[in-house]
Amino acid sequence: MGSRNLFSRIFVALAGGLVVFIADFSPALGTELFADDFEDMTANRWHVGGDGTVQVDTFGGSEALRLTKRGYAIAAVRIDGEFAVKIEVALGATSLEKGDHCVAEASADGGAVWTDVLRLNDGEDEGDSWQYGEADLMLPGAMSTLAIRLRSEGDSNSDICWADDVRVTILDAMSP
Ligand SMILES: [Ca+2]
Ligand SMILES: [Ca+2]
Ligand SMILES: [Ca+2]
């Protein structure tokens, strides 16, 4: 939490409606570029949409983002520098069937290529327990935008995905 004070964020609404967080920071291993634990009971750092519901609700003893059917939420973090970043997320799932998934993914190229951070399938949807995933991603250059997308890949509103504790940190500074 304290590391949030290491940088200032400017909220910019892009033409596409995305909320972009501009991180202005001293590049150091572990510096937090973005984090959301939904404990403020809002998803106001995310652009939400899709065919389904997306709302904050309680799961596993924590406030989390609840996504059903084909609901999604996207956050964008604009980063001035050439870095490798670590993306961490927790996902939970309720009543998935075969072919349903809960997905957390990231893109450093404007959404052309998405890298899975964590993906849950039928059989990983029991109880109210969290599963944790992480992925490393290289940003292509100065003023890159990292997009993080949470989504439910189901076919009904009873296919429920939960997401929490989204965090992006600097893994490595690639250039001085
Ligand atoms: Ca939470
Ligand atoms: Ca199931
Ligand atoms: Ca289903």
Image (spheres, rainbow, N blue to C red):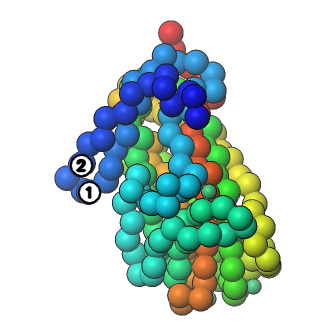
Q: Quadrant of residue 23?
A: top left
The crowd level at tag 2 (other Cα within 10 Å; few <14, some 14-19, many 20+) is few
Dot 1 amino acid type = Gly
Query: As rendered, which of 127 and 125 lies closer to the eye?
Result: 127
The residue closer to the viewer here, 3 or 150, is 3
Residue beneath the point at 58% across and 34% down: 1
Q: Are marks 2 and 1 in contact (CB under 8 Å)?
A: yes
Residue 139 position, x and y percent, is: 49, 34
Disc 2 to disc 1, C-alpha distance: 5 Å
Instruction: Identify which amino acid the numbered label 2 is placed on.
Output: Leu
Residue denoted by label 2: 14
* Residue at disc 1, CB closer than 8 Å to ligand 1: no
Helix, strand or loop at label 1? It is loop
Ligand 3 sits in quadrant: bottom right
Please give the count of numbered marks on the rendered protein. 2
The quadrant where residue 51 appears: bottom left
**Residue sitting at 47 percent across and 71 percent down?**
55
Q: Residue 133's x, y, as percent?
A: 71, 52
Image quadrant of residue 60?
bottom right
- Residue beneath the point at 39% across and 56% down: 44
Q: Secondary structure at mark 2?
A: loop
Residue at the spot of label 1: 17
Relative height, residue 159 to residue 120 (above, below): below
Residue 126, label in figure: none
**Horizontal arrangement in the rendering, residue 147 relative to residue 168 (left or right):** left
Q: Is residue 117 visible?
A: no
